[in-house]
Image (cartoon, rainbow, N blue to C red):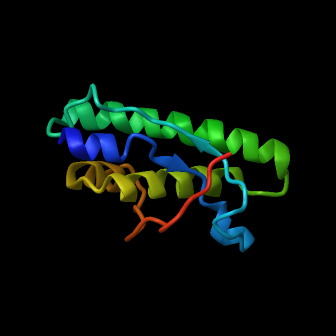
Amino acid sequence: MKLITALVASILSLTTLAARGAGPTDDAYSVTVKFADLDLDRQAGIAKLYVRIKGAARRVCDQQAIDEPAASYPACVKRAMSTAVARIDRPMLSEYFAQVGNKPLKTAPASVAAR
C-alpha cells in the first residue's frame, strides 16, 4: 500500500487538456493530494480522501474559472475528481465515489502536465 501511495501522491490534475485539445507540453492546473496518512482499507479513510480530492478539485477549478471564465465549473470539478479516483484505482474509493452520484473514468489520462 505504501508503494501505491507513493506512486500516486500527486493525483489531481485538471483534465481540461483533452477538452482543449492540448498536448502533454501544454500547461494544466494541478494540486497535490497527500493521503499516506489514511488507511484506504477502511471507510473512514476513504471518506477523508474523498473530501481532500473534492477540496483540491475545487481549488483547481477555481483557478481555471479565473483563467477561462467560459469553462463549466461543475463539469470541471466532476472531471477532476473522476480523474483522481481513476488514477488512485482503489475499489473502495471508486464505490464511494459512485455512491455519491458520480462515476469515475475507466482509465486515467496517460500524461498530465503540471503548472
Residue 86 % position (x, y): 38, 59
Q: Quadrant of residue 39?
A: top left
Q: Quadrant of residue 19?
A: bottom right
Residue 48 % position (x, y): 33, 30
Q: Quadrant of the N terminus?
A: top left
Compared to residue 113, the image places residue 66 above or below, namely above
Q: Residue 63 versus residue 23: which sits nearer the camera?
A: 23
Q: Residue 109 versus residue 26: which sits nearer the camera?
A: 26
Residue 6 % position (x, y): 31, 40
Residue at coordinates 53% horizontally, 34% vertically from top-left?
55
Q: Horizontally, is 64 left or right of 113 in the view?
A: right
Q: Horizontally, is 77 left or right of 90 in the view?
A: right
Q: Residue furthest top?
A: 37
Q: Residue furthest bottom?
A: 21
Q: Residue furthest left?
A: 41
Residue at coordinates 61% horizontally, 39% vertically from top-left?
58
